[in-house]
Image (cartoon, helix red, strand yellow):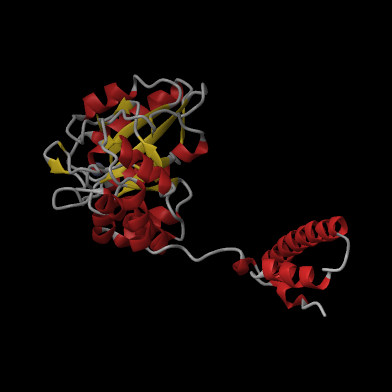
Amino acid sequence: MTDYRYIFSSQAPMFVVVLRHNVQRIDGTVRALISVGICSVITVLTALLASILSVVSPGFAASPPPSVENLKQHAISRYAGVVPAVWGESVSGVRTRLDTDRKVIALTLDACGGTAGKGVDMHLVEFLIRQKIPATLFINGRWIDANIELFRQLAANPLFEIANHGIRHKPASTTGRSAYGIAGTRNVGELVDEIELNARKIEAISGVRPTLYRSGTAYYDEIAVQIAHDLGHEVAGYSLLGDAGATWSAAQVKAALLKAVPGDIALLHMNHPEAGTGAGIIAAVPELQRRGFQFVKMSDFLLK
Ligand SMILES: [Zn+2]
């Protein structure tokens, strides 16, 4: 007798062996054809069973999200021995513009956190809400901790999209490079923590996992850019320097924004109420609208 228990088990080849034993006396050619036919039937039945199970019970096909530790180990082995060649803001794979000729501008507002960077420019935030100006907010984990209630409100407001600005605001290095005197992540594992821990933090509070990442200082090596991609993020550079790290006067910020061209991504800050950034944006927005520009979120367009 043939044992059909093997059809839906991983021991399908044994099933073939059993069958072969039972057809020993049949002519060799017929026997070979039967074996090939049975193998095909098993393959089709297994695939059919898997697809039925995935429809009836989606959890059967989906695996649980990997732990951060697993992601780190995977990245460490994937990039073992790979030495980055470049370090800067315009690394291959960093997206700096919206892929469109339409007269649109994406305002991106960083909130960097830390001792000097956990402030909030409420005058600017209230202006954007009142005037219904969309913006993409790059939020650091330390800023969230200092402003949790406001973070919840911003994340719940469809005018804004929340993007990932790292858990500790580190430049994105796989070898410990620095930018503006700020030490970068020291290795692949630290970089995975920097990106993934803040992505999970944002998702845990807002319910939405971010898909855009800008490192602290916006510096990267090319391996870091690949790792950000591996972790499901587009890397967000910029085409229009809006406030030079929140150091410019309102007049300088306004003048910079009035140079905007279609598809620009403007880099600005929302965490320095003492800076000229807010007043500069508030002065420039009506003039840009008069010129026919619309303000959009980064994710409204493909990036280039
Ligand atoms: Zn920052």
Q: Residue at x 22, y 30 (%)?
A: 250
Q: Is residue 290 visible?
A: yes
- Residue 129, position as x, y percentages in the image: 41, 45
The spot of residue 238 in percent (x, y) is 34, 30
From the viewer's side, name the closer residue of 35 and 190.
35
Q: Quadrant of the C terminus?
A: top left
Q: Position of residue 161 (x, y in %)?
A: 43, 47
* Horizontal relation, residue 122 to residue 33: left or right: left
Horizontal and vertical percent for residue 128? 38, 41
182 relative to 19, above or below: above
Can residue 278 be seen here? The reply is no
In the depicted view, which residue is nearer to us: 282 or 40? 40
Q: Is residue 122 left or right of residue 64?
A: left
Q: How many marks?
A: 0
To which quarter of the image does residue 127 belong? top left
In the image, what residue occupies the spot 78% across and 68% down? 20
Q: Quadrant of ligand 1?
A: top left
Left or right: 153 as drawn, with respect to 57: left
Identify the residue at horizontal 71%, vertical 74% (top origin): 6
Q: Residue at position x 22%, y 24% from top? A: 252
| Residue lying furthest left | 181
The quadrant of the image that shows the N terminus is bottom right
Q: Is 290 placed left or right of 178 in the picture?
A: right
